[in-house]
Image (cartoon, rainbow, N blue to C red):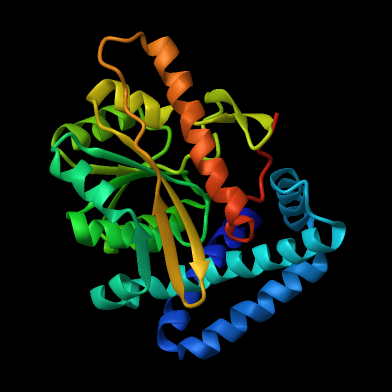
Amino acid sequence: MIDRSVLRDRATEEAFRLAWYGSRHLPESSVRSIFMIAADQIYRRNGASVDRLRKNLARVRPDYSAEQLEQITRAGINSYMRYWMEAFRLPSWTIEQIRERFYLDNTEMLDQAVASGTGVIMVPGHLANWDSAGAWAADRYGGLATVAERLKPEGLFTQFLEYRRTLGIDVLPLGEADVVRSLARTLQRGGMVALLGDRDLGGNGVEVDFLGGRATLPAGPALLSVLTGAPVLPIGLWYDGPRLRGHVYEPIVATPGEDRSTQIPAMTQKLAVSLGQAIYEHPQDWHMMQRVWL
């Protein structure tokens, strides 16, 4: 007799395969309508994820009235489903479409960091479509490496690995023993690393002041910078009509010879300020449906 959990895992894997296939072969307008209808249903059900998003957004924008908070929560669900719609369609986009649909402010800061040969650590948050921004960067700079949370079932995780690798993104599973070493080697070769910086998935992050409250953010970006000398560049992302927009914040650079135990918390706090500003300015595109603050 087949275990129910096995059947459930298979169903999940097949559902995602169907979504990737169907989303790429249907007209974009039809796919968009389907995902926006789904977004409306998710918001109306008001489940635990929607409630968590609402509470997170209330922390981000305490100045909002109850009505404004509901508007931004609903917009957040729409933005989240737009991300999924684009993720399923992204492997079928041409390089020209990826370039046309993304505009990055301060691109010269990223260009200069890459040209310096030290490697670059890009740190966006869970904002808008970070996969599309990654595909743009992989095209412009010849690839990048990142880390991804290991999903269950395993077949679903494999699908996401294949998906991101089609975009020119080399994905390392979170938790593997040599992840930091592998990322450091990429940077030492002058390569690019992208790490989401607004959620402490490993549970061993640095406590910082984040949008007015105490939270832990991942120490990885600062640690890699200290180990390799590569600058950390916070990236803000948001949707602007049909396009994805981005902004590069001032680089955060490790000081050679300074004690690691003081540098990493200080650098992570600077990162929290930049990402916090990006989230504050575009809260509707922050797809954070997990607990953040302590």
Number of marks in picture: 0
Regarding residue 164, the answer to whether it shows in the image is no
Q: Is residue 109 above or below residue 89?
A: above
Quadrant of the frame with the N terminus: bottom right
Tell which of 127 and 108 is nearer to you: 108
Quadrant of the frame with the C terminus: top right
Relative horizontal placement of residue 120, taking residue 58 as reference (left or right): left
Q: Position of residue 259 (x, y in %)?
A: 36, 8
Tell which of 201 and 191 is nearer to you: 191
Q: Is residue 15 above or below residue 194?
A: below
Q: Is residue 187 above or below residue 55?
A: above
Q: Residue at x 54, y 90 (%)?
A: 30
Q: Residue at x 36, y 24 (%)?
A: 223
Q: Position of residue 102 (x, y in %)?
A: 36, 68
Q: Residue at x 32, y 32 (%)?
A: 179
Indicate the quadrant where residue 123 lies.
top left
Q: Position of residue 246 (x, y in %)?
A: 42, 58
Regarding residue 190, the answer to whether it shows in the image is yes
Q: Position of residue 200 (x, y in %)?
A: 54, 34
